[in-house]
């Protein structure tokens, strides 16, 4: 509620916030009410129901909206205290390392290597911006008839940090298959009309006012590690019978596959 309300008067498309109730006695929990935004939700990365020009337009708009978010002046929208002090990646790597260790079900050498490599190779953070934390196609509402984003949703993981974490998060799909559908890594992007990773990053940089991104693969590797840690937690909850979806137990090999592909990227840098 706080971050979407702060962003409402910026160019970032978010629903309007109507009210926040922090009194759990009203309906049994805290809640907020927001605007109903008409739009389409697509969860498949390849957008099979759309045409190549529509796919291209939506992916380029993903890059534009992400850059627009990262260009928001944190102080001017009242979010100066929204995040914790200190290096964003140090906090995140530490957090997800602990989460992974707590939900570990088997030995994955690649995860151990990543937990050692990542803290020793953190690039310098140039500026602090609003990080969505889960910026992906499935968290966007697309205009009912046009290939453009009308609302960014699901801000539960948002904080202040390095915007390149969002960019690397979305771009990890260029290096790994999606969980239950074909990912961008093995797709014929030219035929589908979906921009390549280089084209997507260039579009982001154009809107963000950046000339280039140094140490680019770090941001992809970090996000693949983070995703592996999250997925491992979901799988462990599935085994324990505490998962929100019955599909959780189907994630058995995903943490291993994603972390091994991340480590392969590390090795490709040497």
Image (cartoon, rainbow, N blue to C red):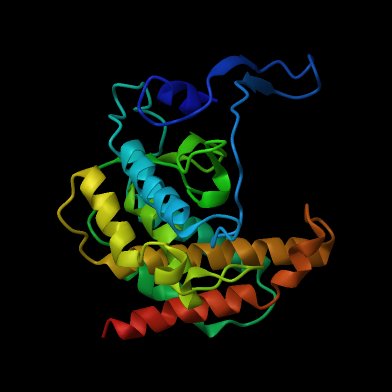
Indicate whether 225 appears above or below 64.
below
Please give the name of the residue rendered at 40% of the width and 49% of the height, measured from the top-left corner.
57
Indicate whether 146 appears above or below 245.
above
Please give the name of the residue rendered at 61% of the width and 53% of the height, measured from the top-left corner.
43
> What x and y, as percent, mark residue 224?
47, 67
Please give the name of the residue rendered at 44% of the width and 70% of the height, measured from the top-left corner.
191
Does the image show residue 112?
no
Q: Is residue 257 left or right of residue 118?
A: right
> What x and y, as percent, mark residue 26?
78, 14
Place residue 202 in its image quadrant. Answer: bottom left
Please give the name of the residue rendered at 78% of the width and 56% of the height, measured from the top-left corner.
243
Indicate whether 3 appears above or below 188.
above
Q: Is residue 23 left or right of residue 12?
A: right
Quadrant of the image containing the C terminus: bottom left
Indicate whether 57 appears above or below 81.
below
> What x and y, as percent, mark residue 219?
35, 63
> What x and y, as percent, mark residue 55?
46, 55
Quadrant of the image containing the N terminus: top right
Front residue of 209/264: it is: 209
Q: Is residue 156 left or right of residue 60?
A: right
Work out which residue is located at the far left of the displayed protein and give it: 211
């Amino acid at each position: 509620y706080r971050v979407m309300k702060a962003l409402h008067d910026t160019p970032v498309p978010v629903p309007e916030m109507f009210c926040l109730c922090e009194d759990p006695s009203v309906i049994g929990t805290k809640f907020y009410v927001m605007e109903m935004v008409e739009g389409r939700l697509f969860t498949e990365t390849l957008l099979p129901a759309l045409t190549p020009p529509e796919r291209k337009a939506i992916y380029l708009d993903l890059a534009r909206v992400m850059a627009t978010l990262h260009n928001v002046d944190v102080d001017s929208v009242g979010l100066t205290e929204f995040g914790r002090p200190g290096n964003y990646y140090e906090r995140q790597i530490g957090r997800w390392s602990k989460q992974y260790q707590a939900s570990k079900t088997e030995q994955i050498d690649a995860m151990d290597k990543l937990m050692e490599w990542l803290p020793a190779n953190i690039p310098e953070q140039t500026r602090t911006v609003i990080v969505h934390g889960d910026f992906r196609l499935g968290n966007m509402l697309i205009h009912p008839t046009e290939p453009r984003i009308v609302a960014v949703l699901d801000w539960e993981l948002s904080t202040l940090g390095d915007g390149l974490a969002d960019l690397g998060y979305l771009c990890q799909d260029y290096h790994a298959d999606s969980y239950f559908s074909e990912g961008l890594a093995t797709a014929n992007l030219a035929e589908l009309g979906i921009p390549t990773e280089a084209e997507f990053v260039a579009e982001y940089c154009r809107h963000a006012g950046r000339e280039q991104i140094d140490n680019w693969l770090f941001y992809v590797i970090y996000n693949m590690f983070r995703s592996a840690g999250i997925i491992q937690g979901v799988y462990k909850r599935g085994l324990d019978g505490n998962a929100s979806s019955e599909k959780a137990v189907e994630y058995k090999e995903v943490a291993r596959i994603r972390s091994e592909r991340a480590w392969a990227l590390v090795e490709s840098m040497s």
